[in-house]
Amino acid sequence: MLSKDNIIILEEKNYQYIIGARLKNESEKTKKQIQEAKLSDGDILKIKRADHTCLIITYASTRAAKDGHNRKRGLQRLEKQIKSGKLTKSSINNKGYNKYLKLEGEISIRIDYEKFNKDHVWDGLKGYITNTKLADKQVIDHYKNLWHIEKAFRMSKTDLRIRPIYHRLKHRIEAHICR
């Protein structure tokens, strides 16, 4: 959902929204401001942006532990692939933990441990972008309820065990589904 085109559409229709932020993609000034805040467990930082939106950042130690664990697991996977020789120059992209890889020369691939070690400052941080007038805590709570909406969209015709329907009248649709 987080794309410039989708955000423009939401704003043109005057919709209020709360979306997850990619903190590492923010401006250098904003990233510096986030890192200087030195948030502790449960702290919230609010940054007003020029486009009349707010960036809300939270820190959770449990999330930090999970993020750190996932980074280490990704690094171990990369190390294993390099040792086995399965990782080639053509199979590298910048997705996931491949961002820690560094190409040297024509075919030499190694892990950039400096980049890996610097990334720990983002562990535990979660960002939200919103144009609502809700309180910071309410924004976070509403975003956490997103799984309810996602669950509703996951339901499909196979879950209901019905075939496609071509009815227009309410009682015919109900009869078809409730059979």
Image (spheres, rainbow, N blue to C red):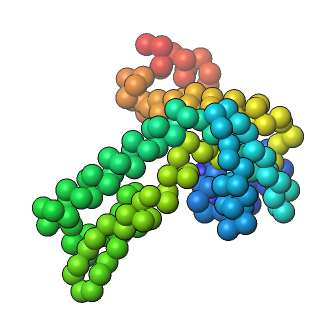
Residue 15 can be seen in this image: no
Residue at 55% of width from left, 34% of height from top? 61
| Quadrant (top left, top right, bottom left, bottom right) of the C terminus | top left
Residue at 83% of width from left, 36% of height from top? 134
Residue 43 x/y as whole percent: 71, 36
Residue at 55% of width from left, 17% of height from top? 174
Residue 59 x/y as whole percent: 63, 39
Q: Nearer the viewer, residue 150 or 136?
A: 136
Quarter-of-image position of residue 60 = top right
Residue 135 can be seen in this image: yes
Q: Nearer the viewer, residue 84 or 169?
A: 84
On the rendered structure, is 84 left or right of 131? left
Residue farthest toward the bottom in the current orientation of the protein: 106
Q: As displayed, is residue 118 above or below residue 175?
A: below
Residue at 32% of width from left, 54% of height from top? 75
Q: As displayed, is residue 39 above or below residue 62?
A: below
Residue 143 x/y as whole percent: 66, 35
